[in-house]
Amino acid sequence: MQATTGFKFKRFYAGELVSIGRELDALKGGTIDVAAPLLAPYHEGRFPLSDVSQLPTYGTSSVMATRAFQKLIDSDVKLDGKKTFYQYELGDKGIRGWALGASAPYSLSTTGKELKSPADMKGMPLRAGSALHTIMLQRLGATPVTMPAAQAFEALSRGTIAGIMLTIGDWKSYSLQDILKYTITGVSLGHWESYLAINESLWKGMSEADRKAWDKAAREVAIKNSEGIDAQDVEILNLTKAKGAKFVAIDSLSKEMSGHMAKAAYETWVQWIDQLEKKGHPAKAAAKLWASLIKAEGGRLPEGVDAYLAR
């Protein structure tokens, strides 16, 4: 962005200036002007609707999720009759934000055990990386074990967990490419999204030309990043497949097993919506809008979700 807009940045990396989950406070307090990324899921309770991208889908990619999430931010649909998604999640907090490249689809992988029937998952300890992952794993009958991905290698090696929910492209980052041997593909157990965020006062202080340049660069970089993320996913899949890892498309699973996963995916949508609605958030409206946007990108929803959202 610096090269295309003329803006100059002083960079701080990996929690050097602000720790994870404190980006919003740092933006509002003036410690930083830009958060790249602002990790909404780590700001517990402060971005309640932003986890919508982590709802399970079928046949989606980073590019598809990134485009859909930016359209969600841009949408003028009033979720609660008063506020758009942008106003609800970002505008009221005094920040301005754009989608970053979403993660590739989260997949379910094990150290070797093949998941051929629902019974194979019963009580199985599996790593969950978010609240929505926990819901999904519980619905599958597994035992969720919440931990950072950085701790997964040791836990998998010791047998503390038997598998993990993670994007395939991230395996190499955590040295998991030689330990994960079985993966179900074709179903996305959500996409992790984050924001490129700046202080609203900084935005208002820019010239019109600078705002246009910033906006254009932010959108272009997000898509470029997501294309790279998808390519990395394919690269690691092919690399590990050549070494003997097994990748099984959900459509090739038994009817019992694919139906079990579809039911769990549907129930994850319903539970996430119900939990947030009880707290006063327009989760169903947000999920309905997200569903329409992800379908417009070519993605599919778990069976029953469309009917539930139409009620």
Image: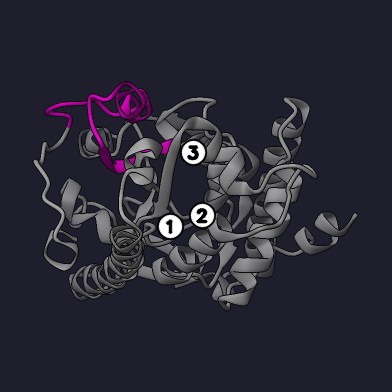
For this view, does 17 lie left or right of residue 276?
left
Q: Which residue is mark 3?
A: 124
- Callout 2 crowding tier (Cα within 10 Å): few <14, some 14–19, many ≥20: many
Q: Is residue 32 above or below residue 38?
A: above
From the top left corner, tell me how far across and down residue 135 is, in percent.
60, 38
Nearer to the camera, 195 or 74 = 74
**Residue lying at 37% horizontally and 57% vertically, measured from the top left:** 103
Residue designated by label 2: 189
Whether residue 142 is visible to the viewer of this picture, yes or no, is no
Q: Quadrant of the N terminus?
A: bottom left
Indicate whether residue 35 is drawn in magenta. yes
Closer-to-camera residue (154/21): 21
Q: Which residue is mark 1?
A: 107
For the point 74% across and 64% down, the residue is 303
In the picture, the disc for residue 308 is none
User: In the rendered structure, does residue 293 fall within the stretch colored magenta?
Assistant: no
Q: CA distance from mark 2 to mark 1?
A: 6 Å
For badge 3, the amino acid type reads Met
Give, as a three-letter code, the residue at label 2. Answer: Leu
- Location of the C terminus by quadrant is bottom right
